[in-house]
Image (cartoon, rainbow, N blue to C red):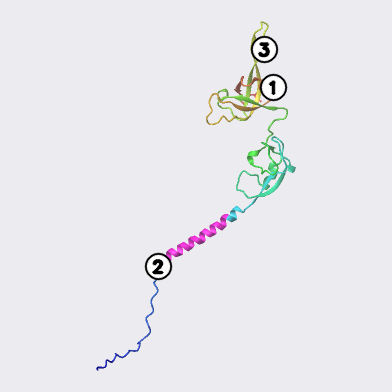
Amino acid sequence: METITPPPRTAPTGLPTARRAPSVSRRNASLWAVGLLLVILGALGAVALVRAGDERQAVLVAADDLPAGSPITDADVRVAEVSTDDLELVLASERTALVGSYARVRILAGQPFASGLVQTTPIVTAGRVVVAIPVSPVQLPAQLREQSIIDIVVLGATPTDDGSVAATPVVARGVVTEYPDFGADASSNTVAALSVEVDPSDANAIVAAGRNIGIVLRDPTEEDAG
């Protein structure tokens, strides 16, 4: 029987070759760097927005309820810290300018003062009254504005000796304090209120006349216009 001799084993000649890790291209590395930078910038931006939202300003608010037209005294004003970017609010540094002005509308206690809520002149001049006159757009002169000087012509009915009634015009001088808002869809039949400051002796006749009036715009440079 023939004997088969296996081939001799050969000793390893060296260490096995290590596998090379796949290399990252320069382009991929740049994309990773840009992405990381964007994440960092986003985080910094969010922090900045949070800090900006937390910034508070010292503004002036009403210490108590103020009726429309009332003068604003130092006791009516207090300082409060608020978080806002409203440029119309009156800052604490403007206290001297605010005191002595007048409330244009009703202001509630704790409500911040804003430039649109106050005015430097009284709403009603001493010794005068304000009446609301119902008017339509066709009754008003084209150049009529707030603070315009006008003559209000009221047609009063006066009985005559023969029993008939004659229309006797009554003219009252006034100053427009608020122009009516007729709205975008106004027509000749639209009615709104024209606020006018007049002498108290003329107020009742104007109110009783309703829409039975005429408006005459006066030249403010005339000697008798005031």
Secondary structure under the numbered disc 3 in the rendered image: strand
> As displayed, is residue 81 above or below residue 213?
below
- Give the magenta-colored segment's residue range: 29-49
Q: Is residue 152 magenta?
A: no
Residue 51 appears at what percent x and percent y? Answer: 59, 56
> Disc 1 residue type?
Asn
Instruction: Tell me the crowding category of disc 2: few under 14, some 14 to 19, or many 20 or more residues within 10 angstroms, Cα based.
Output: few
The furthest residue to the right: 75
Secondary structure under the numbered disc 1 in the rendered image: helix
> As displayed, is residue 1 above or below residue 156?
below
Precedes in sequence: disc 2 or disc 3:
2
- Quadrant that contains the N terminus: bottom left
Could you tell me what secondary structure mostly forms the magenta stretch? helix
Q: Nearer the viewer, residue 80 or 219?
A: 80
Instruction: Give the residue number, with chain letter if any, for mark 2.
Output: 26
Instruction: Tell me the crowding category of disc 3: few under 14, some 14 to 19, or many 20 or more residues within 10 angstroms, Cα based.
Output: few
> As displayed, is residue 187 above or below residue 111?
above
Instruction: Give the residue number, with chain letter if any, for mark 1.
Output: 204
Q: Is residue 34 magenta?
A: yes
Image point (48%, 63%), residue name: 36
